[in-house]
Image (tube, rainbow, N blue to C red):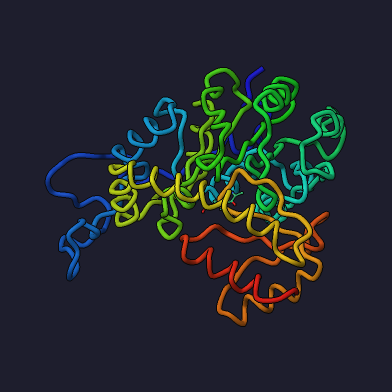
Amino acid sequence: MSVLDLARPEIRAMQPYSSARMEASGGQILLNANESPWSSNGDDLGCNRYPDPQPAALIDALAALYGVQRDQLLVGRGSDEAIDLLVRAFCRAGEDAILIQPPTFGMYAVCAHIQNAAVIEVALAADFTLDVDAVLAAVTPAVTPAVRLVFICSPNNPTGQTVPRAAVERLVQALAGRAVLVVDEAYVEFAEAGSVADLIGQYDNLAILRTLSKAWALAGVRVGTLLAHADVIALLRRIMPPYPLPLPCVAAALAALSAPSVAAEHIALIDEQRGVMRAALAQVAGVREVLPSQANFLAVRFDDAGAVYQRLLAAGIVVRDVRRYPNLADALRITIGTPAENARVLAILQGGAA
Ligand SMILES: *Cc1c(COP(=O)(O)O)cnc(C)c1O
């Protein structure tokens, strides 16, 4: 059985859009795409031309960075786009489902709702670890709606825990022929355990989401990557918009990737500051618990999270109110900033019991 047997048959059968850039590349005089022959004012990137759908230089750089083959990788507008493409390709509207483990990142459920796929929830344990048996029990074959995609987020947003590699392997093996396991590694650069991207070659039902938005300081550039079996990548390319990556964004991504030591320094500083903040916050009056985190944020429980949120806001500091998430009714999520910004947060919180 191929992983493609899990995909929507009409997506496998459809004739994809064929753009001018795909049909013919090269040539000196380009009169095939109804572009302007002139660059616009101030444009030194050649933005009068449509961009390469999957720019070769960026594909090469990301394949090297993530340790996969070029055909095992799809670059899109943030990992958000990859989540959407996965749901569209694998979930039949009104019939299939995704499985998530709350509290977790909101986009999985949003993309499922847009596609009219059901969302099956298997809550994380009280300590926010993943219950592999409970997940597998919820992915029962021949039951409607059929779970096609199982999302796990490691490190998890908004709680910060990672899923052990052994659990990922158990899941992906048990789900073979039943569902695709999607591991969202948006924050993995900040984690000690590291990526499971090296497993891509072993399992055709494994997909991994990576992004330049967090550790690479490029949230505004919107470059995210899906790593998966070449068949899955080829399938998603059929339904991807024709020109997803704007030329200035590709240029910005390549510039950042050419100076990896800058990102590495910042990652090390964030990891160090996360430890400093965790220890300091635990001493603050009104703090109940600082959850252990392997990401660039801390989830913090307070006696009165609402009051703390307002006090920080009054001081010009915006944190994320995560009280609507299950098991986090007393928590705020605080991103690790510069050392000066973090010191300011502590100063406000130490200024009096909340
Ligand atoms: C921030 C984040 C992303 C990144 O999304 P982009 O679209 O790549 O910016 C993906 N997953 C999780 C869990 C996140 O927190």
Q: Residue at x 36, y 45 (%)?
A: 53
Percent of width and height locating residue 248: 30, 57
Residue 306: % across, % down: 76, 73
Left or right of 187, for residue 258: left
Location of residue 41 by image quarter: bottom left
Q: Nearer the viewer, residue 284 or 251?
A: 284
* The N terminus: image quadrant: top right
Of all residues, the one furthest to the bottom in this rendering is 314
Q: Is residue 56 left or right of residue 85?
A: left
Q: Is residue 33 visible?
A: yes
- What's the residue at 33%, 42% (across, down)? 261
At 68% from the left and 27% from the top, the residue drawn is 168
Would residue 15 be seen by someone viewing this image from the given angle? no
Q: Considering only vertical position in the picture, is 353 above or below 131? A: below
**Spot occupied by residue 319 in the image (x, y as percentages of width and height):** 62, 67
Front residue of 194 and 198? 194
Quadrant in the rendering for residue 12 = top right
User: Can you tell which quarter of the image residue 348 is in?
Assistant: bottom right
Residue 222 drawn above or below residue 202? below
Q: Position of residue 166 (x, y in %)?
A: 69, 23
Image quarter of the C terminus? bottom right
Nearest to the observer: residue 170 or residue 1: 170
How many numbered badges does the structure rendering display?
Answer: 0
Q: Residue at x 74, y 74 (%)?
A: 353
Image: 236 above or below 347:
above
